[in-house]
Image (spheres, coloured by chain):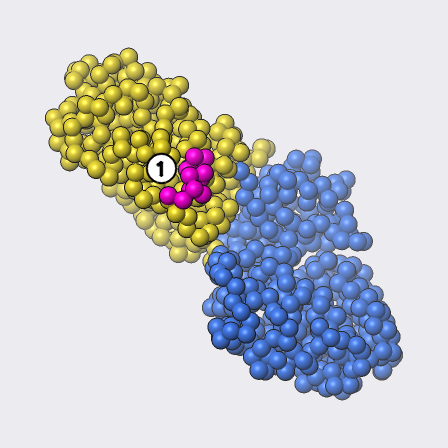
Chain colours: A blue, B yellow
Amino acid sequence: MQKKYLLAPGPTPVPERALADMSLPIVHHRAPEYSVILQEVRDNLKYLFQTKQEVLIFTSSGTGAMEGCVSNLLSAGDHALAVRGGKFGERWFDICKAYSVNVKALDVEWGHTVSPKSIEDALNEDPEIKAVYIQASETSTGVYHPVKEIADIIKKRPNTILVVDAITALGVTNVPQDEWGIDVVVTGSQKALMLPPGLAFASLSEKAWGFVEKSTLPKYYFNFKKEKKSLEKNQNAYTPNVQLIVGLREVLREIKEEGLEKVFKRHANLANAVRIAVQAMGLKLYTADEPSNALTAVWAPEGIDAGKITKLIREKYGITIAGGQDAAKGKIFRIAHLGYAGCFDVITAISALEAVLKELGYKFETGSGLKAAQKALFGE
Amino acid sequence: MQKKYLLAPGPTPVPERALADMSLPIVHHRAPEYSVILQEVRDNLKYLFQTKQEVLIFTSSGTGAMEGCVSNLLSAGDHALAVRGGKFGERWFDICKAYSVNVKALDVEWGHTVSPKSIEDALNEDPEIKAVYIQASETSTGVYHPVKEIADIIKKRPNTILVVDAITALGVTNVPQDEWGIDVVVTGSQKALMLPPGLAFASLSEKAWGFVEKSTLPKYYFNFKKEKKSLEKNQNAYTPNVQLIVGLREVLREIKEEGLEKVFKRHANLANAVRIAVQAMGLKLYTADEPSNALTAVWAPEGIDAGKITKLIREKYGITIAGGQDAAKGKIFRIAHLGYAGCFDVITAISALEAVLKELGYKFETGSGLKAAQKALFGE
């Protein structure tokens, strides 16, 4: 008998009430019952995004909404800047390339935060840059980029917008779209929204909607204007994943009930405990600068392949954490603490990590990680 | 947001696959589909009970099957002995009284194990005793009674049977009915069977069935002969809780897949870790002699009401453990580790216990319980 624990940075565990709701019979997406659900979902998405704008909903993974943020905002040959400090920064770059956007990469060493200054320099160097693409939390490296400071730079420039992939940031850390003046915020269902994968979201500022008007790139399924028009009539443009929308209603209720402030505080506490615990075990954080509160990326101890850690922890203890991707493959592992996560998930993760590292021959004092996590979570 | 953890000695958590099966549409109990389910359940119950006898199934809580073990086995005025070392020993005594059985109590100090010798003495003193009623695991005190040794004494006596309430023992500890020669074994659905409450089970030896033939006490719903006859035709005498029977099919599959030996070993390991952990925190076990592997009863630290511990751990951390009952109320708390329980449930329980005791002013080294549990579960 082996219980399963999902401690990877998405998909994340689904709250029991949402699971139960999603096992109810399928609602028809043109039925009156669905209208009531969608209306509530639309209202609560605005609460989550901290925006007055309509939050667009797509039945796709997060990448679909990312693609839409290129195809709906730019035209072929437009200049763009992609902050490339991890796998998902690369994705922005690749999408731009696929659409013949004249994209420049702002390369950042993996594990590091981009400096707002370097973005300002890039914009000064090429004033034609129409969009800056970035991650708030770069999931592949566990880094949090200084979105607020970057927004401050870009909002002064009438011809440039900031597009933020907040897939592992929204609902984890405070990223108030309207207050900070972020032009586009994108997220997915399977992270802090605590749902299975299958929905993507994008919210655009007035300024960004102006860019949509001028965009000539081809688009059909991820047509932002069409989706907005439909939502304003309380419908989806194409058949939505109604099962996930029903789950979404429930998780948004739970987020609202807890309150954003408490949600952010909870994530900060869990992240803090994991960082302290792994360091108490003598491990080194992969993230050099400001870490994301969604996940903690950790260097595998010298001489131990990180892939062995993730394999053993899954097979022996039923726990799914993530390894490193691309350049970080085999070198790091990533423990998530986002979404439907509480203190005892952190305790479980550290307990299992201790057991696995011990088995792989890493030397440290048994219980040292647990003790540090316990103190961080509950006090001395 | 608060995850809930059920760490009380019943009801216990239900495995996800069983929950999913129980949310399927209700099967009719006379439909062919149900026959297939019941046949599998009957076979696997024999595996669980380690018996060739038919295991009777009642839609009731465990107490219903206990009552049937008096009303079906004895007649008014018959002599009986009830081992009374906890709340559930008292229940045997009270049921006998309710049916005008001439029952004698063998009182055992709470927290202690009955000595087989004292039972032999009682039987010698009153050779008319027809039935000895006992718990294998006394849930109120966390004590395991030496059932094997007691069975050895009773099986030599043709006019006496041993009736064992194994409600928190079956599927936790090895209690092989046929091999040990236990005449009656009773259990319920909400303990090691990992289901919601609502089903009770009883399995009778040939010798016990002989007693049934002579019993003249009134019975109707808990009529053992009637239920046996129905089951042999692969039916239930009265409308069964089909939803739980569907769940039962799944949990019995899971138990069989893991294998009884591994199931017992798992429970022993978890129990051992909890005992070691609480003692490492300076706490004292309530159970003086052999403890049950289903739960661990622990004295609250001096000056701290145990009720405050169970209240705080539930309200603040969403964890349900049990307090003391009757004589032990306010003095002890009980952490269960039975059924759908694994290593990280123990780690979670100890982490929460540390947090709560710290808050209530008990002095101990933070992390000491966790460290001890970690070592016990995973090695140095």
Q: Main secondary structure of the magenta part?
A: helix
Residue at image location 78% in from the left, 85% down from the top: A214
Please tell me which residue lies in front, A118 or B22: B22
Amino acid type at circle 1 is: Gln
- Residue sitting at x 19%, y 14%: B124
- Residue A7 colored in magenta in the image: no
Q: Is residue B315 above or below residue A365?
A: below
Asked whether B37 falls inside the magenta stretch, the response is yes
Q: Which residue is mark 1?
A: B235
Provide the residue span drawn in magenta: B30-41
The percent coordinates of residue A341 (x first, y second) are: 55, 56
Q: With A194 as the anchor, is B209 left or right in this view? A: left
Q: Is residue B40 visible?
A: yes
Identify whether B114 is placed above or below B308. Answer: above
Question: Is A151 left, or right, of B372 in this rendering?
Answer: right
Q: Residue at x 68, y 42 (%)?
A: A311
Q: Nearer the viewer, residue A73 or A217?
A: A217
Is residue B286 something that shows in the picture?
no
- Chain to which the residue tagged by mark 1 belongs: B
Residue A196 drawn at (x, y percent): 60, 59
Picture coordinates of residue A369, whole percent (x, y): 60, 45
